[in-house]
Image (spheres, rainbow, N blue to C red):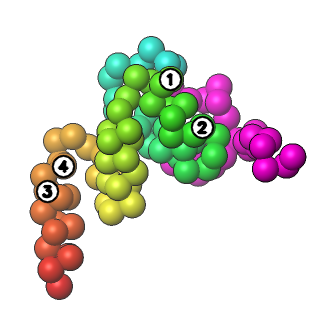
């Protein structure tokens, strides 16, 4: 019976170290994704506040988009989420993998 229950935490630690609840997440109508909002969604998914499917549905995002945000944070931190710097961080990561 316990396996079938969905247990979600009441809060998780956000990208800037503060407690974050569902109410603190960006609104579902968000269309402009700045670094902080992307990081908040990734933190919510990583912490179990939202499932990845719930995040995709809530924000009308693709699975690949959220996965790319997760990879960017893992590789380069929040700076890796900057759209204007994607190529720089991508090249840096490729160089690191070659050594």
Report if the CB atoms under discs 1 and 2 are less than 8 Å apart: yes
Q: Which residue is mark 4?
A: 86
Label 4 environment density (alpha carbons within 10 Å; few <14, some 14–19, many ≥20)? some
Local SS, label 4: helix
Q: Residue at x 75, y 40 (%)?
A: 6
Separation of residues labelled 3 and 4 (CA atoms) = 6 Å
Image quadrant for the C terminus? bottom left
| Mark 3 lies on residue | 88
Give the percent coordinates (x, y) of residue 43: 53, 46
| Image coords of residue 91 (percent x, y) | 12, 63
Disc 1 to disc 3, C-alpha distance: 30 Å
Determine if residue 31 is in view: yes
Q: To which residue does mark 1 refer?
A: 58
At which x and y percent is residue 73?
38, 55
Q: Main secondary structure of the magenta part?
A: loop
Q: Which residue is mark 2?
A: 50
N-terminal of the two: label 1 or label 2? Answer: 2
Q: Nearer the viewer, mark 2 or mark 3?
A: 2
Which mark is first along the chain, 2 or 4?
2
Q: Which residues are magenta?
A: 1-26
Question: Which residue is most to the bottom?
Answer: 99
Query: What residue is at 37 percent from the left and 29 percent from the top?
Result: 61
Drawn side of residue 7 relative to residue 95, left or right: right
Element class at badge 3:
helix
SS under mark 1: helix
**Of marks 4 and 2, the one in the foreground:** 2
Q: Is residue 1 above or below residue 54?
A: below
Residue 23, magenta (yes or no): yes
Looking at the picture, does residue 13 appear above or below residue 50? below
């Amino acid at each position: 019976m316990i396996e079938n229950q969905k247990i979600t935490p009441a809060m998780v630690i956000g990208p800037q170290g503060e407690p974050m609840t569902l109410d603190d997440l960006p609104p579902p109508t968000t269309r402009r994704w700045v670094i902080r909002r992307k990081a908040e969604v990734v933190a919510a998914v990583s912490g179990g506040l939202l499932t990845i499917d719930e995040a995709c549905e809530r924000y009308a995002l693709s699975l690949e988009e959220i996965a790319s945000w997760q990879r960017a944070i893992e590789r380069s931190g929040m700076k890796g989420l900057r759209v204007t710097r994607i190529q720089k961080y991508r090249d840096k990561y490729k160089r690191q993998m070659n050594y």
